[in-house]
Amino acid sequence: MSEHNEYDDNAIVNASSNLHMNDLLAMRLSRRQALKGGVGVTATVLLGGLGLTACGGSDSAAGLALGFAAVAKNKNDVVTVPDGYQVSILHALGDPMHYGDSSWQNNGTETADSYNRRIGDGHDGMYYFGLTEDGKYDANRSDRGLLCVNHEYVVQPYGLHPAGITAGASRVASEVEKEIYAHGVSVVEVKRSSGNDMSMVRGSKYNRRITSATEMAFSGPAKGNDGLKTKFSADGTKTRGTNNNCANGYTPWGTYLTCEENWLNVVGRAAGDDALRTAKEVVSLKRYGLTENRKSPYLWDTAGSDDLFARWSSSVVGASAADDYRNTANNFGWVVEIDPFNNTSMPVKRTALGRFNHEGAWPAPAVVGQPIVIYQGDDARNEYIYKFVSKALWSASDVNGGLAAGAKYLDEGTLYVAKFSADGTGTWLELTHGKNGLDASNALYAFENQGDVVINARLAADSLGATKMDRPEWGAVNPLNGEAYMTLTNNSNRVDPTATPTGSQLKPDAANPRYYTDTYTNADNTTKTNKGNPHGHIIRWKENAGSVAATQFAWDIYLFAAENNAAADVNLSGLTAVNDFSSPDGLYFDPRGMLWIQTDDGAYTDVTNCMMLAAVPGKVGDGGKATAAGGTATIKGANATPDSVRRFLVGPKDCEITGVAVTPDGKTMFCNVQHPGENGSLATPSSAWPDSQTSAGSSKRPRSATFIVTRKDGGAIGV
């Protein structure tokens, strides 16, 4: 989600004194062993659960080459794809998933209840699961499957209502109810219809909505913790709803991981509430951005006294936590596991993976006899990158194990946070109660147990001195060599390396090295100047000792986003007109090892709509040392070329391109457009997508939607 959107949670709440890399540059590093060689995994890798592929530390996809003409930057109100490709719409906001509900009416008159059976709003992360005839997960099946799609937020100004949100200090209950049901996740069955195109199977028994009102269970170390207890669940074992679901993940046993990011959108807190809390509670609330007298952008808690609405206020109003929703904030910020193959199963919030602004949860390729490893990003400035390593070792017999397999691998394990060093090495710091000072005597926060640690993962990471990063967005893991990538979308809050920072400002550092000035025109034709790193970059790392469970790693910066005509110390990756981009956000490795890069841009939209690029990546260490604009030393990957990175598509007006999945045979691509036309209004819309994709001059309301890309000749995508 763009930092220019009012619902994006960009408040900086990390006030810790943890070192940045510029501080580390001044330190004498001693006894630091440089990492050498590739990942070197020699065990058999189970990709997606079934297809066994040898992984011998390959640097990139052998023989994989980009085989399409680059799409030019443009401002059209369609999804533009290369010659020889075609686009179809799978589903959009309001489309009915079952029979009995009317088609979307283009006027906001659908009932709130019907959104328990309609496609939600704000399409975001997603994953495709192959489906067998007997209802099992088949990682190799491409013609029939289940598609899980996140619905991050209610898009304004169009949204769900006849005339937009009704103005006033208190929200209208019927509008809020509809918004609650429009958040969450959609699970739909898809089948190939014509060639490699797909269509949604309306009425399928697998079609299901998980919303901000769906009952869910807690599992792992925080289950039953005092910090999770509410009026709904006095013992802290259950909650209702998943919210602001941004990116995602999947498991090799065939379940979906949806991740709760900007949940502060819907949680408020009353004035004077600090005085009703313990000092420990106040520390936690403030560290997660929930200060007293905070009104959430959605104001859901103002719609009435019914628990459907009241539970969005985290204020103390009862005698104990069992009498109110003072702990409602702690019920969000988790990774939620969903079994798409069992439509009666209750989703589970896996607390061992920690609580923060989860952008996503990206698994490394599962290796038989080794732990499950999941990488995670906390999407806010000054926050951290995390890794979870399961206690249980992977067994292929757990494929199709559902939520029971999830309990085995995701409820017990070790949570780590990353500390980057300026010499290109890094360390994973263990966030375990009783280790590294994470106990009741901790001066920052008294951690009584592991439940306290995971609920307050940010505070635990502060205490250990983790490295503050710039809005870690999406991650992805190369299935061929295990190297991990993460987008750092942008940061205009940096200062000249020679200046003294004030407030939340940051100096450049080795992993976030650029400082320069960029001037561009906003959608409202006003001119804006950003100083710092307005276009963002992508960092990557490889684990030491040939194991993704290692505690040491090496890193470099894979790509620096930039305009192609920028100065060389800004355009450090040598981007040209065929591959320049801004604000990398979505990231995905398909099963072949091709990397897809998506943008959510506010600083280049005077030139082009948001886009997606295809890449054949190299490996960590394929570049070398460099000096960025502003004079900061860094470590960069090899320069991009038209053969290694190329623009594959451009989206419609005012959108974000987000979420991508490719079928195992590489012939069908799913992709999402979020908030097309968000800079317009109901009176003067700026987009009519997805209707404009096939009907030029359409005046229909824009909607977030999932679209499908195929090759006209039936070949594999991208090659």
Image: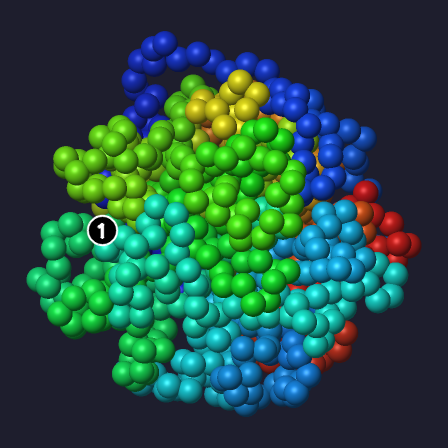
Residue 670 lies left or right of residue 65; in this view the side is left
Q: In which quarter of the image is residue 496?
A: top left
Residue 116 lies left or right of residue 226; in this view the side is right
Depth check: give the residue in front, 698 or 280: 280
Name the spot of residue 704 as percent of width and height, x first.
59, 69
Depth check: give the residue in front, 468 or 526: 468
Q: Is residue 715 above or below residue 556?
A: below
Name the spot of residue 203 as percent of width and height, x first.
70, 77
Q: Residue at x 65, y 45 (%)?
A: 399
Q: Dot 1 corresponds to which residue? A: 284
Residue 57 lies left or right of residue 154; in this view the side is right
Q: Is residue 110 above or below residue 82?
A: below
Q: Which amino acid does label 1 sit on?
A: Ser
Name the spot of residue 17 as percent of width and height, x first.
23, 35
Q: Which residue is drawn at 47% across and 81% down?
A: 178
> Is residue 461 in view from this perspective?
yes
Q: Which residue lies furthest to the right in this view?
A: 713
Depth check: give the residue in front, 470 or 551: 551
Element marked by disc 1 = helix
Q: Residue furthest left?
A: 275
Residue 50 lies left or right of residue 458; in this view the side is right
Q: Which residue lies furthest to the top in this view?
A: 31
Q: Which residue is drawn at 31% across and 13% down?
A: 28
Q: Quadrant of the C terminus?
A: top right
> Is residue 513 in view from this perspective?
no
Q: Quadrant of residue 311?
A: bottom left
Q: In which quarter of the image is residue 186?
A: bottom right
Q: Which residue is drawn at 25% across and 42% down?
A: 449
Name the spot of residue 38 as percent of width and height, x first.
61, 20
